[in-house]
Amino acid sequence: KISYYNGEFKQDADISIDYNDRAFYFGDGVYEVIRLYNGVFYTLEAHIDRLFRSIEKIGIKGIERNEIMEIIAGLQQQNQISNGYIYLQVSRGIDGRNHSFPVNTPPVVMAYMNTIESSAAQNEEGAAIITSEDYRWLKCDIKSLNLLPNVLEKQRAVEQGAKEAVLHRNGTVTEGTSTNVFIVKEGTLYTHPADNLILNGITRLSVLEIADELEVPVKEESFTLADLAAADEVFITSTTLEVLAVDSVDGQAVGEGLKGPMTMRIQEAFQKKTQ
Ligand code: PDD
């Protein structure tokens, strides 16, 4: 497999990472995960737009959109992958360990592609989730490499046999550790507004578009843990999981305990978009 690090495409085995890359010391960088279906990147522009918003928000300078597009094209050309994903990160660059930004140091891009199994079969079943306190920072709209709280809470979920930990701030549900969260109540879809407390998922945006097409009422309003527990349906979304039904929250069944009709309609519509 051919991957990319700091200006060069190489076989994975031949890539060595500079230990002075600020991504290591500080998680000082941002990233994207973009899905490829049948040889076509899904919502590529939206991902690149969000990457550059993240880049701008943390003040990384010296990287252009066409560089990123060329790296993506290069990876696609050199790897025979038509159903998979690309992981792409941009760090502030390579320098000695100083908290302050290096001067005249170019950013470093790392990127690779991998195959991924179709989520459709996997998403037939619902998943268990747990709830956890959201003790992350207040700039969750930035797709930062700093994911320690996300990693810790995801692991807590895994250790309890759950797929995801859904986070809350003082009882207000924000998002999952690597997903956005939707609930259905009396035919209306609710999800946290796209502010600084969540990452505005591209899959989240696809679902909102689908809801609009299906004329499903949507409220981009925050909801509570009690609302989550009492929801008719719950599902989570991400580039890698797509639209995944949640059948239990903290061990309590959601709704009737079966995948709900709204979740099914949205899953179907999402699959059509990605085929
Ligand atoms: N995670 N919220 C968080 C905190 C995320 O990390 C992600 C994505 C999402 C969903 O965003 P999108 O629909 O654009 O994938 C929401 C990626 C997939 C990851 O870290 O692997």
Image (cartoon, rainbow, N blue to C red):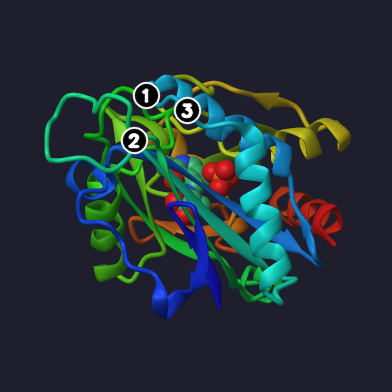
Residue 170 % position (x, y): 25, 26
Nearer to me, 180 or 200? 200
What residue is shown with label 3?
62
What residue is shown with label 1?
58
Q: Secondary structure at mark 3?
A: loop
State the image quarter where residue 160 is shown.
Answer: bottom left
Q: Amino acid at mark 3?
A: Gly
| Quadrant containing the C terminus in the rendered view | bottom right
Residue 208 % position (x, y): 71, 33
CB under 8 Å between callouts 1 and 3? Answer: no
What residue is shown with label 2?
92
Q: Amino acid at mark 1?
A: Ile
In the picture provided, is 44 more to the left or to the right than 172?
Answer: right
Q: Secondary structure at mark 2?
A: loop
Q: Secondary structure at mark 1?
A: loop
Q: CA distance from mark 1 to mark 3?
A: 13 Å
Dot 3 crowding, Cα within 10 Å, few <14, some 14–19, many 20+ = few
Q: Amino acid at mark 2?
A: Arg
Residue 256 % position (x, y): 58, 58
For the point 35% across and 38% down, the residue is 29
Q: Earlier in the sequence, mark 3 or mark 2?
A: 3
Labels 2, 1: front one: 2
Nearer to me, 5 or 188? 5
Is the CB of the residue bearing disc 1 within 8 angstroms of ligand 1?
no
Labels 3, 2: front one: 3
